[in-house]
Amino acid sequence: MCMGKFMNGIFFKMVISVVAIFTTNISLGQVFKCIDGDKTFYQSSPCLEGLVRDDINTESANFYLPDQILLVNEMSLDKSLYPETHLPYEVEMELGSNIQLKTIGVLTDWWKKRPIEIRVYDYSSGVKGKLLGSKRFSAYLDNVCGDTFNETCEYPDNQGSATAELKVKVSGKASAIKVQLGGLLSAANKFVILKGIRVYGR
């Protein structure tokens, strides 16, 4: 009887060890960074033939498990948007495939050269479609900078501290989106700085 319990204990520990190893292998698996011209996106499967491919570990790719959110596309921009001539401002992004969208991040100023409102529309058919999500930023947010965009914003730049990411939750699938920016957080700062757009989904 004791021997049976002992063997059962060993078997139970072995099962737990195997599960732990399997889980570790999943979390440290690879994600593929695919480059198509000026578009960069990440996916858990190999890049299509003809695309530049960069195999990287999940720890360095902002990559998560399948039930979590993944950075699927990003666009670098360098815009100074004046309210009287440029706002509201719209930009389209092709996503390469029909993505289940979760969050859109707008990279902007560390201080108050930020938009007040961000709206995201479906643009899969080439025209502005359904509103997928929107958010107003009428107050200054301080902890949206740094490498992970949850650190204090400050200047001069120290590990991304002078770039903020304003995030908007979105819902729906799309192969292309249109992002619209409106307003200026502080009129004294004269214009909105737009550094890029990041798309998170599954």
Image: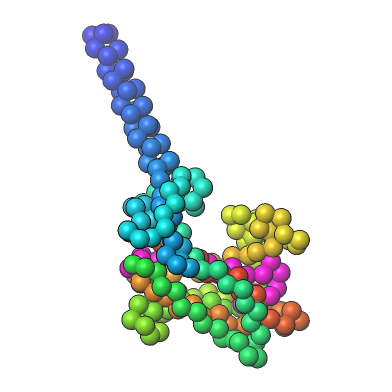
Q: Please, which residue is most extreme toward the front here? A: 50
Does residue 162 appear left or right of residue 72 in this picture?
Answer: right
Q: Residue at x 68, y 59 (%)?
A: 161
Q: Nearer the viewer, residue 119 or 43?
A: 43
Residue 122's image quarter? bottom left
Question: Could you tell me residue 123's position as x and y percent?
Answer: 39, 79
Q: Nearer the viewer, residue 35 or 18?
A: 35
Question: Could you tell me residue 70's position as x and y percent?
Answer: 43, 57
- Judge whether residue 138 can be spotted in this image: no
- Judge whether residue 86 can be spotted in this image: yes
Q: Residue at x 58, y 82 (%)?
A: 182
Magenta residues span: 98-115
Does residue 140 appear left or right of residue 52 in this picture?
Answer: right
Figure check: 83 above or below 109: below
Q: Residue at x 55, y 68 (%)?
A: 76
Figure check: 170 above or below 127: above
Question: Could you tell me residue 191's position as x and y percent?
Answer: 69, 81
> Is residue 159 within the magenta segment?
no
The type of colouring in the image is rainbow
Does residue 135 appear left or right of residue 112 in this picture?
Answer: left
Chief SS of the magenta region: strand
Q: Residue at x 30, y 12 (%)?
A: 6
Q: Please, which residue is most extreme toward the bottom here? A: 84
Question: Could you tell me residue 138's position as x and y percent?
Answer: 63, 76
- Screen quadrant of the N terminus: top left
Residue 188's image quarter? bottom right
> Is residue 112 within the magenta segment?
yes
Total labels drawn: 0
- Screen quadrant of the C terminus: bottom left
